Image: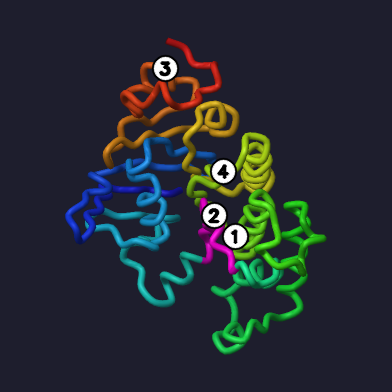
């Protein structure tokens, strides 16, 4: 189980990104995080794996206090938490294989990883991950020669190299067209259902939330304003999260008043 307890983040410039946010996520859930840009979605996900340190509160993953972890303990926790980014975060001039192998850095010998020397078993694991996302034929192609959808699949394969129990996806389909968006979320759904990986995924479009999420939380100005199942996210509740911007967001035409 993941527990987020009274999480607050105030940046040095005084911006309050999160305000006393608390919720729990059961193992195996597919949790969608919704809210306007600037609502705190990315900050929340980055606090969970300590890419950002919260100002107050705790994140507890399988009874391990992530916010208090340091050194080896923090590295051990991070191995269990994969991360997929909106802008892919690939080394564009490196091959797909090199990018995927970088997901194994948390396990690699420091000197070996410095020179990108990974054991044969890791190469086999990387090929298996690329096969799962359907681009094994691109293993030796430079990342900057791939389409956006292919680059995001590389990002998923890289995260899989950590053998995670929890996957954080920070608006993974925001820069993709609707067809590619569904293909990427289908991979995450497969990992969730077949591998039992818990998924936290920030999304904007409610048709995607209704299709893939088992539960939804909504953030507004850094505060938790909704926590429920997708069927409870009616048009009125959606407006409570998005305010006047609600009419500008594609909702898939399947909300109730």
Q: Which residue is mark 1?
A: 159
Dot 3: what SS?
helix
Mark 1 to mark 3 CA distance (whole Å): 34 Å
Query: Of label 1 and label 4, which has the lower sequence position?
Result: 1
Q: Residue 35's mark?
A: none
Dot 4: what SS?
loop
Query: Nearer the observer, disc 2 or disc 4?
Result: 4
Query: Of label 4 and label 3, which has the lower sequence position?
Result: 4
Query: Is disc 1 surrounded by few (<14), some (14 to 19) or many (20+) residues within 10 Å?
Result: many
Query: Of label 1 and label 3, which has the lower sequence position?
Result: 1
Which residues are the magenta region? 79-91
28 up-or-down from 156: above or below = above
Q: Which residue is mark 2?
A: 84
Q: Residue 173's mark?
A: 4
256 up-or-down from 92: above or below = above
Q: Residue at x 22, y 49 (%)?
A: 16
Query: Is disc 2 surrounded by few (<14), some (14 to 19) or many (20+) residues within 10 Å?
Result: many
135 up-or-down from 23: above or below = below
Q: Would you say residue 60 sits in the magenta stretch?
A: no
Mark 4 to mark 3 CA distance (whole Å): 23 Å
Query: Nearer the observer, disc 1 or disc 3?
Result: 3
Q: Residue 235's mark?
A: 3
Query: Is disc 3 surrounded by few (<14), some (14 to 19) or many (20+) residues within 10 Å?
Result: some
């Amino acid at each position: 189980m993941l527990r987020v307890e009274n999480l607050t983040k105030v940046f040095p410039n005084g911006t309050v990104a999160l305000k006393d946010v608390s919720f729990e996520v059961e193992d195996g859930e597919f949790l969608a995080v919704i809210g306007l840009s600037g609502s705190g979605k990315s900050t929340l996900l980055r606090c969970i794996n300590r890419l950002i340190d919260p100002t107050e509160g705790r994140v507890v993953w399988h009874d391990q206090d992530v916010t208090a972890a340091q050194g080896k303990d923090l590295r051990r926790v991070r191995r269990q938490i994969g991360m997929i980014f909106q802008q892919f975060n690939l080394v564009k001039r490196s091959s797909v294989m090199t990018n995927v192998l970088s997901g194994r850095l948390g396990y690699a010998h420091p000197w070996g990883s410095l020179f990108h020397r990974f054991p044969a078993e890791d190469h086999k694991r990387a090929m298996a991950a690329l096969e799962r996302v359907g681009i094994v034929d691109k293993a030796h192609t430079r990342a900057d020669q791939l389409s956006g959808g292919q680059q995001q699949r590389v990002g998923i394969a890289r995260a899989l190299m950590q053998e995670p129990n929890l996957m954080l996806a920070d608006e993974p389909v925001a820069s993709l067209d609707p067809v590619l968006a569904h293909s990427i979320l289908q991979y995450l759904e497969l990992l969730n259902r077949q591998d039992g990986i818990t998924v936290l995924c920030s999304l904007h479009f409610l048709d995607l939330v209704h299709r893939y999420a088992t539960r939804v939380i909504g953030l507004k100005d850094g505060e938790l304003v909704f926590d429920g199942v997708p069927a409870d996210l009616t048009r009125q509740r959606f407006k409570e999260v998005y305010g006047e911007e609600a009419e500008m967001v594609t909702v898939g035409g399947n909300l109730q008043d």
